[in-house]
Image: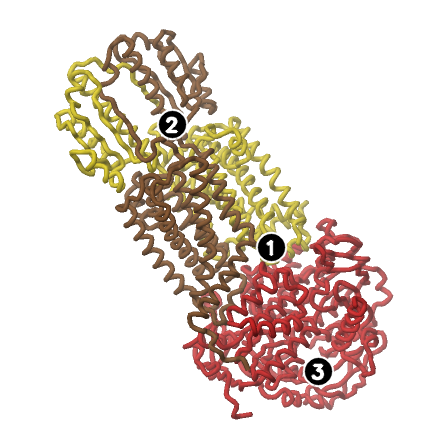
Amino acid sequence: MSAPRTMAGGFAGLLRRTRALIRKETRQLLRDFSSIAIGIVMPVTLLVLFGYGINLDVRNVPVAVLMEDDSAPARGVAAAFELSPYFSTQRVRTMNDAERMLMAGDVRAIVRIPSDFARSIDLGAADVQLIINGADANTARISLGYAQGAVATWAAKEAERTGNAGAAGGIAVEPRLWFNEANDSSYFLVPGLIVLVMTLIGALLTALVMAREWERGTFEALFVTPVRSAEILLGKTVPYFVLGLIGLALCVVGSKLLFGVPLRGSLVILTLVSMLYLLVALGLGLVISSATKSQFVASQVTVLVTFLPAMMLSGFMYDPRSMPLAVQAITYVFPARYFVTLLQTLFLSGNNWSVILPNAAVLAGMAAALLALAVRLTRKRIA
Amino acid sequence: MIVSLLRILTLIRKELLVLLKDPKSRASLILPPILQCLIFGYAATYDLNSVPYALVDQDRSAASIALVAKLEGSGIFRREGTFARMTEAVPQLDARRALLIVVIGNGFERNLETGVPAPVQVIADGRNSNTSGIAQSYAGAIIGDFAAAWRAERGFPAAGVTVSTRAWFNPQLETRWSMIPSLIGTITMMMTMMLTAMSVAREREEGTFDQLLVAPFTPTEIMIGKAVPSMIVGITQASAVLLVALFWFKIPFAGSFFTLYAGLALFLAAAIGFGLFLSSLAGNMQQAMILAFVFLMPFMLLSGLMSPTENMPAVLQYLTMINPLTYAIRITRVVYLEGGRFAELLPDMLALVAIAAVTMPFAAWMFRHRLN
Amino acid sequence: MEDRPLSLVARDLRKSFRRDAKETVEALGGISLTVRKGTLTALVGPDGAGKTTLLRLASGLILPDSGSLTVVGLDVAEKPQAVQDRIGYMPQRFGLYEDLSVQENLDLYADLNGVSPAERRTVYPRLFEMTQLGPFKDRPAGKLSGGMKQKLGLACTLVRAPELLLLDEPTVGVDPLSRRELWEIVFKLIREDGLSVVVATSYLDEAERCEHAVLMHAGEILAEGPPAEITAKADGCCFLVKGPEGVPARSLQARLFALPGVVDAVPEAGRVRIVRRPDRLEEPLTLEGLQLETEPTGARFEDAFMMLFDSVAGERDHTSPAPLAASPENAADGTVVEVRDLVRKFGDFTAVDHVTFSVRRGEVYGLLGPNGAGKSTTFRMLCGLLPATAGTLRVAGNDLLKAGAKARERLGYVAQKFSLYGQLTVGENLEFFASAYGLRGNRKKERIATLTAAFELERFRDLPSGQLPGGFRQRLALAAALLHEPDILFLDEATSGADPLARRQFWGRITALSEQGVTVIVTTHFMEEAEYCDRVIILDAGRNLAEGTPVEIRERAVSGKTAPSMEEAFIAIVERERAKRTEKAA
């Protein structure tokens, strides 16, 4: 007669059961190529793409240069564009040709040096026309800045040459970029990358594996054992937590080795805040899957409430300061916003406690609330 | 032929029923595109309208005060505080209370008057180099204008050369104008690819796929039966986004709806082809979903949505060529903003046809050969 | 016995479910029940009787609407966890982790239940021996055959000896050998460990072996007591009937079953066993003007069961099928299904090993065999769902894997696992499959109406099929496969989990189809169902052990004892062949 033992067995039982569930979950995770795909293949792919492919710095913008004036200053301006690394130019003869190329998408802009250019210079008010395709507003705006820069540089040199110092403009604006002196967009993309990877592993993967158990009915038998719902949740979270940290490590090491992105803050703090965010993401995944109980719906909801905000509203791609106030307010609802702030600070600025403490506190609060909600929602009941 | 058509119709009806029956799944098909469009529309903008900055005015002259007035008069720059020394302003930047520090150097006014270049430092928080660069260029432009006006008032010679700009298709260079049309493709791609991949995986998981294979459906019929409902959903979602663009964001539509929808239909065929291709690799819904993501991310990054494709290294440029989204974004922008005609876009449309022509037959072949 | 402590006490237990927004369905309508410690109680009843609901209530997975339920001395609604710590529960659909191996699934449940390593050393070998899963320890659970999964589920439930064991249809899809072994384990636990067991089952021979049987119907208890007491109600009403020469037993059975005074009829060793209504025993038994000879025989639990349900089930459809005719032997010339030297390997494992058989037009052909014998694999190859490694396959002259869609038009297929669209309603599913097979217009409407009525699916028409009770899902799957009146019907364990009444109706329909010339190939674990077949083949470990008519198969197995039942014959043949093989190996 081996029956009524102390099955629940207090703390030892809790440990044993949790360990068994973690082992089970880890095995399932390791056997499914999709977890490896999302935990390892995706971070590496994104890292490479962000490092080499996604360059927000505009270079080699194709422009058509139309010279209606053949004077020395006009040639000088044209040369300024031709020598600039930001443009790849081609000369055209008529405005018609130029416009056709712009329409056809062969060039993004037309630089037109009007026939009275040299004469106007002598009068002190010459004008270079820039006609730009605004369909991609961002690239257009950046190109515009470069064009102005190219012309201004030429004008300054010209002024120096003619000994007319100061004529080019009275104020010398000295732009400086702190924290990212190289003005390299991979510097600020890496923190974003970490957010995306963590969000996908933490929220999406967890939501799917949890919803799958509901869908396949594997919970029915599991529920009628001494296992507690908190143990089930713990078993679900630990392996994905570890996978998330592996993703983090890949991102940090990869960005350092491949692109030399500095980590100015402490690695320990970075790891700690990442853990906090992972907990929030896991909590969200668990809550969503418990509420929907269907893989299909859970995946849709997770993308909508975790992934998209992480990409769009977190300050990773777009600065919330540019958004309308109502949208700015909404960004504060999403945990990714706090995490991106933390990551950007830790990577590029350093251990800046006035940023770290409040943001980390918000994440901690969210993690606690979500995990508590997950425990409440995961009752050992079916239907 | 007719019989085959009727069987396909049966499959389509079934698929739409499965998709639209459950209110939760119905909502998950139409709400997300609209929400995404609104979120992206408001969030995805580089048009700064409020830049907090810290001022370090070491000159405290009439000229420096006039410059600050000009900066703030733009309505964009908002002063977080004025500091005597740099060291006092720095924490503002560190704590992200200010995006810029504007330092007006000692002797600013004197230099202006004597014609010696007067230094103004604009220090930006490079944690988001993109935003910072834009804020700096705003500041630079305003300061430049100020200098020109100041000197003109006092009879100094005018600055030499100016650049006058005219932007076609988007006169104000609003990010939103280029963003939203691109979203028509991006959002529908995300949704339809996931939808298609998961719907096949769901049938495999639930065993209904066997039932289809035993029934007198040919693989091609099954494939069309899966593709058309996704296409219908995709077109509906695209139209929803289009309506938001036209009537909520009020972005003027320059082209022809026929060309736009023709392009969208071909694009959806290619995207769905990819979804079906993924579904033949995935054994269950989880794998289908994750595969869709692993493919979607690079598709989005390599599409020209966020950065122009011509800047990418050659290898990646080849990859952009097999990416349906690259063509979709080009087509939607060209049709919507530039009013491009069908003939102009023919190469892009043909590329989409080619992608669908490879992925769809492969998926159909895999239906039967991915047994066990 | 009366003073034994109570394991389960239910008082006026009620539970209803909301179906959609408007309709509520009463699953249990005030049940009172007690289960004494150390006893085996069987819950029997047709589909939708409320057996599963009762077990789920007892395991704390759902809450009752009213009434009280005490399990192992604890109120389940109040302390579900405390109850779950002390009981064992095997759900109808035991959700194994398909990507974990057999051993890993077992280990998980052992860990969760706190089975010590020392206990495992004694329990595991016993479980592996019982389930014959030993050779498959490292195989992922998802790759096991249906019956093997069921056995693994049971093994997971039995890793520890709980105070009360709740089993919901534990032997659905389990072959007779394993079923016997499985019950031996359960009986041993009751005997040696004083375990109490409540089992819901549709195998009435299992219920017969219990100490206490509870007959449920539509959420209420119809009768309860020791099986022998219940069986006694059918005493004197049971007879064996022999039909005219050349008439298949199933044809006679179908007609007898349709007679007004007959409660039950099943084929048995070439004859038909019938149960007559007690109030009509005096009437002579005539069929088509012919007086039939009857020979009295002893009552079984199943006979009493059928009699009790006949009294509450309302009027059965007594319209007699077409007049009795001799088996269309002469018409059955063409060979419809031909399998020669069929081999299927999965890696090193040979699932089907040179199997050869052929099925003639209009035949009912049975594939029998223990779990993992290769029946389903053979089936999937026949249906074109799986390529063969070697050998030839012809279904109506085609290899379905390569043949076009047209060749599949005349085929009906019911998979082992329920595989219709769970989100769609019963009506929508039927609509879809009717159109899939090219039915249109009035003909479609008419076929759907006929089958909905025949399978008693009207009241579920608008229910998503995923929410149907188990047995009704089976009916729906069969109805969907019959819509287009196929020439060849493949039924992979189509009756597993169906209640006895539903099985009678099912076989009545199969009989009618075969009389119209439809070829039926069927696998089943109900050996008495093999009696409906013209011929059967017994497979084990992918090899052909025996082929012939049910009578021939029985004769082969005779060993002194007279007239073994089909089940006994099956067990004898498989065991004899297995013994031979081990001898050879040694």
Q: Of discs 2 and 3, which sits in the foreground?
A: 2
Circle 1 — which element?
helix
Q: Quadrant of residue B98?
A: top left
- For the colour yellow, the matching chain is B
CB atoms of marks 1 and 2 within 8 Å: no
Q: Residue at x 63, y 42 (%)?
A: B362
Chain C colour is red
Foreground pick, A316 / B118: B118
Residue at the disc numbered 1 = B204
Residue at the disc numbered 2 = A140
Residue at the disc numbered 3 = C262
Amino acid type of disc 1? Arg
Can residue C447 be seen in the rendering of this structure?
no
Amino acid type of disc 2? Ala
Measured along the vertical axis of the image, is residue A16 above or below residue C407? below
Residue at the extreme right of the image, as rendered: C330
Please state, as top left, top right, bottom left or bottom right, where the C terminus of chain C lies in the image: bottom right
